[in-house]
Amino acid sequence: MSGRLAKRRGWRRVVNGVNLASLLVAVFVSAPLYWLVSASLKSPVEIGATPPTAYPHPVTLTNFRQAFLHYGFGRYLLNSVVVSLASTVLVLALGILAGYALGRFPMRGKLPVLMGLLMISVFPAIAVISPLYLIMREIGWLNSYQALILPYTAFNLPFAIWILRNYFIGIPPEMEEVGRLDGASPLRTLWSIILPQARPGIFTAAVFTFTACWTEFLMAVSFNSANGYRTIAVGIALFGSAFVVPYGTIFAASVAAVLPIAILVLVFRRSVVSGLTAGAVKG
């Protein structure tokens, strides 16, 4: 009995140690985010105060008003929403079909296709930015939504196919047999039977794709130089001038840019974790 009690106490100490370490890591990771939010609610004088204050006193929303009214951040936000949503929808539509075909149907050359997708997913965008720019200029797509939507779709599609394929593999084949017995076509079976079972994988692909499009900078600054088509990443980078850097406004705009992603991850966190785990185990 004393040996078992000692083991239990030992395990409790290990668990308590892990919990304490997790808490410290959470505080360490959350500290920059807290500082960002806190600074966005401070006045310019308080932001530059020495020593710095731990919290805003008093709280002011002037930085947010400046970002949206003076710098036109609302337009940048709208552009990012349009580009990110459109790219995510296209990636999911194509990725679901490709992932389902690669995961459920026998075909020749499947391994080279998968290896090709893996290579494309790690290909740096900077390597093709120049030819893409020339193509966009020749077809007249510079300073337009499609100048970002199509490249974003192409660069994020391979990773989405990998996630969705791995999740489709883990769905029992009996599900499709039920659809065949009822006389459903493959597309009908996919829509009515398979997709409801693959929601975690779909949510995972959607969150990762939307986040990648939302934060992308290189293509956005290269293809859309007109102010009316800039995304939030480019807009925030251009807030400053040669003589003035509006730190408070930049902090406020950064908070407004991070908030949608944070909400998206919090809402779908369980589905994302489930989708990633399924892809890692069943792939």
Image (cartoon, rainbow, N blue to C red):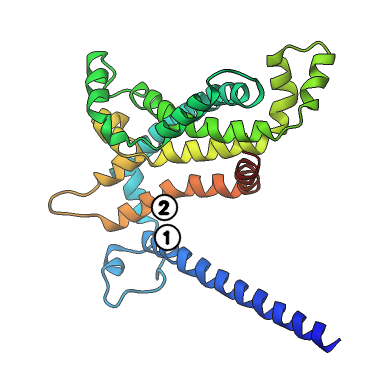
Label drawn at residue 37: 1
Occupied quadrant, residue 129 = top left
Disc on res. 1: none
Look at label 2 and name its amino acid: Val
Furthest-left residue in this view: 243
In the rendered image, residue 116, in percent from the top left (x then y), is placed at: 44, 28
Q: Earlier in the sequence, mark 1 or mark 2?
A: 1
Q: Secondary structure at mark 2?
A: helix
Q: Which picture quadrant has residue 100?
A: top right
Q: Amino acid at mark 1?
A: Val
Residue at x 56% of width, y 47% of height: 265
> Which quadrant of the figure contains the C terminus?
top right
Whole-percent x, y for residue 58 in the image: 40, 68
Q: Is residue 115 left or right of residue 52?
A: right
Q: Position of residue 204 (x, y in %)?
A: 58, 40
Q: Quadrant of the N terminus?
A: bottom right
Q: Which residue is mark 2?
A: 255
* Left or right for 30, reference 223: right
In the image, 137 versus 74, the foreground residue is: 137
Q: Position of residue 18 (x, y in %)?
A: 61, 72
Q: Residue at x 60, y 37 (%)?
A: 203
> Number of labelled discs?
2
Tell me if residue 25 comes above or below residue 231 in the rendering: below
